[in-house]
Image: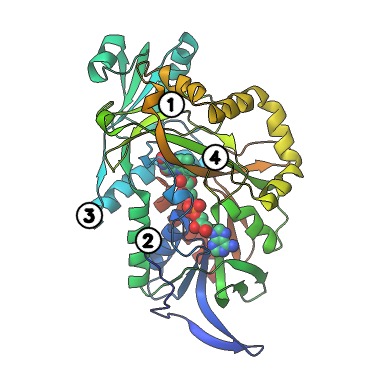
């Protein structure tokens, strides 16, 4: 777990008395101590050294939600539409993440990824992904069946695409280093500070939290699973809601820690924003299997069957959820079945790793994805922002936002500086 920064060292801004209450004032306020908020704060202080900055995190530890519950993959960006922000940021993000790790001594590895086609239609889709890799300028190599078996004796498929640059890292280690650099530059990182009110004025934004009141010139909200609620709290009229999609994993037993050498992925369904159940070597030396994508009953509670009535009540009233459910009914039923029945889940992996058995599926903590959905039922695939004169709200930062956090942070920081000085 990350260190607690509740102590307010490096008070860069000013302390004011407003309406009889103490208010910490800063040039910038960032909401959310996940990797996107931390990267934004870090990039802001690189752009404007000496600026006063406060980062507010609801939990008692930083990076305790999506940033700590993911596959730990440094994605290459092969999947994404060439004109999307995702494509732009993930390619740059993969390079910058690796450079950041090298510079700060954070361990990472580059085992490379194999996208494995097991049926003729998947083979065809793999061909399209290979073309896309060419458009993105990504090095990749096509493997036939014997070449695949030679590299990965436990994996079977008709053909595979090897992307050597795909890596793995522990994103909480990256987040921890970012927090250290932010406080080193004079920024305040305050945990246990859930934001409960936001008021935008002509000359400032006022933010109320459990830990105190703050005022800033420019606000950037990177609240992940709560991003829609934060935008609404700030009075924005938004067309999207966050729907929590659980990503459930298993872990292979220790005697199978060398079962695969590469990351092994199925060919994804282009209609869905998720990548399919995959085998991933981790920095801890284990191999995870997953994640699936099943509708969550809570945004922030991880044990299976945890329910948050506030979260469920909210999405049941949202027409977008029902439209997504209708459009993806078959997938939804399959995902629920896979979530409830280990044997069903196993079948997903046995498509390309046929020797795995139920006994190989050991428990591993789930993650919960913040997936923004429009009222008309559109699942938003790309990053999405909403801006006012003094605020930027990140409404969708799905995978690969951990990979892409440094360039996303740079983009948000540039916008925040421009807006503050406009
Ligand atoms: C199962 C799964 C697998 C994934 N795999 C990968 C992968 O392999 N590679 C990759 O690049 N990406 C992956 N992702 C995506 C990636 O983890 C996320 O896109 C990324 O972590 C988003 O970061 P964030 O900072 O926006 O969100 P978070 O890490 O969720 O941080 C948001 C923060 O905001 C805080 N917050 C919320 N409300 C408030 C409030 N009111 N006041 C103050 N603070 C608040 C939260 O407590 C939280 O700490 C995966 C995600 C999941 C769930």
User: Residue tagged by mark 1?
Assistant: 132
Q: Kindly state the secondary structure of the residue where label 1 is placed.
A: helix
Q: Position of residue 134 (x, y in %)?
A: 38, 26
**Mark 4 to mark 1 CA distance (whole Å):** 28 Å
How packed is label 2: few (under 14 Cα within 10 Å), some, or many (20 or more)?
some
Q: Position of residue 321 (x, y in %)?
A: 70, 38
Against 260, residue 392 (above or below) is below
User: Residue tagged by mark 3?
Assistant: 105
Q: Earlier in the sequence, mark 1 or mark 3?
A: 3
Q: Are marks 2 and 4 in contact (CB under 8 Å)?
A: no
User: Residue tagged by mark 2?
Assistant: 2
370 and 407: which is toward the camera? 370
305 and 335: which is toward the camera? 305
Q: Quadrant of residue 176?
A: bottom left
Q: Kindly state the secondary structure of the residue where label 3 is placed.
A: loop
Q: Is residue 97 left or right of residue 267?
A: left
Q: Are marks 4 and 1 in contact (CB under 8 Å)?
A: no
In this view, the mark in front (3 or 4): 4
The quarter of the rendered structure image containing the C terminus is: bottom right
**Mark 2 to mark 4 CA distance (whole Å):** 23 Å
**Mark 2 to mark 1 CA distance (whole Å):** 38 Å
Q: Are marks 3 and 4 in contact (CB under 8 Å)?
A: no
Question: What residue is drawn where x is 54% and y is 34%?
Answer: 293
Q: Earlier in the sequence, mark 2 or mark 4?
A: 2
Question: What residue is drawn where x is 40% and y is 29%?
Answer: 361
Mark number displayed over residue 246: 4
């Amino acid at each position: 777990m990350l260190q607690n920064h509740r102590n307010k060292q490096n008070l860069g801004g000013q302390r004011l008395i407003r309406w009889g209450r103490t208010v910490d004032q800063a040039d910038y306020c960032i909401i959310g101590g996940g990797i996107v908020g931390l990267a934004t704060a870090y990039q802001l202080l690189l752009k404007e050294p000496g600026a006063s900055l406060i980062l507010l995190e609801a939990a008692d530890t930083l990076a305790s939600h999506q940033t700590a519950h993911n596959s730990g993959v440094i994605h290459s960006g092969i999947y994404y539409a060439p004109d999307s922000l995702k494509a732009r940021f993930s390619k740059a993000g993969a390079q910058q993440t690796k450079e950041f790790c090298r510079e700060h001594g954070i361990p990472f590895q580059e085992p490379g990824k194999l996208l494995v086609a097991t049926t003729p239609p998947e083979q065809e889709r793999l061909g399209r992904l290979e073309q896309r890799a060419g458009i993105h300028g990504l090095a990749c190599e096509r493997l036939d069946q014997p070449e695949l078996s030679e590299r990965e004796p436990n994996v079977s498929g008709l053909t595979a695409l090897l992307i050597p640059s795909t890596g793995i890292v522990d994103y909480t280690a990256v987040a921890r280093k970012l927090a250290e650099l932010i406080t080193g530059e004079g920024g305040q990182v305050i945990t246990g500070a859930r934001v409960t009110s936001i008021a935008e004025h002509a000359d400032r934004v006022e933010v109320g939290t459990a830990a105190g009141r703050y005022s800033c010139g420019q606000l950037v909200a990177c609240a992940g699973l709560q991003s829609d609620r934060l935008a609404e709290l700030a009075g924005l009229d938004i067309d999207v809601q966050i729907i929590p999609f659980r990503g459930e994993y298993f872990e292979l037993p220790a005697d199978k820690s060398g079962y695969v050498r590469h990351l092994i992925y199925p060919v994804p369904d282009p209609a869905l924003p998720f990548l399919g159940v995959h085998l991933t070597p981790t920095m801890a030396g284990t191999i995870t299997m997953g994640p699936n994508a099943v509708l969550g009953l809570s945004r922030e509670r991880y044990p299976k069957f945890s329910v948050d009535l506030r979260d469920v009540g909210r999405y049941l009233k949202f027409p977008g959820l029902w439209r997504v459910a209708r459009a993806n009914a078959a997938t939804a039923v399959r995902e629920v079945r896979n979530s409830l029945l280990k044997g069903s889940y196993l079948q997903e992996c046995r498509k390309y790793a046929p020797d795995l058995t139920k006994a190989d599926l050991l428990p591993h903590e789930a993650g919960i994805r913040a997936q923004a959905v429009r009222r008309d039922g559109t699942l938003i695939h790309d990053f999405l922002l909403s801006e006012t004169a003094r605020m930027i709200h990140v409404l969708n930062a799905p995978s690969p936002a951990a990979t892409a956090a440094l360039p996303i942070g740079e983009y948000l920081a540039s916008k925040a500086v421009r807006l503050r000085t406009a």
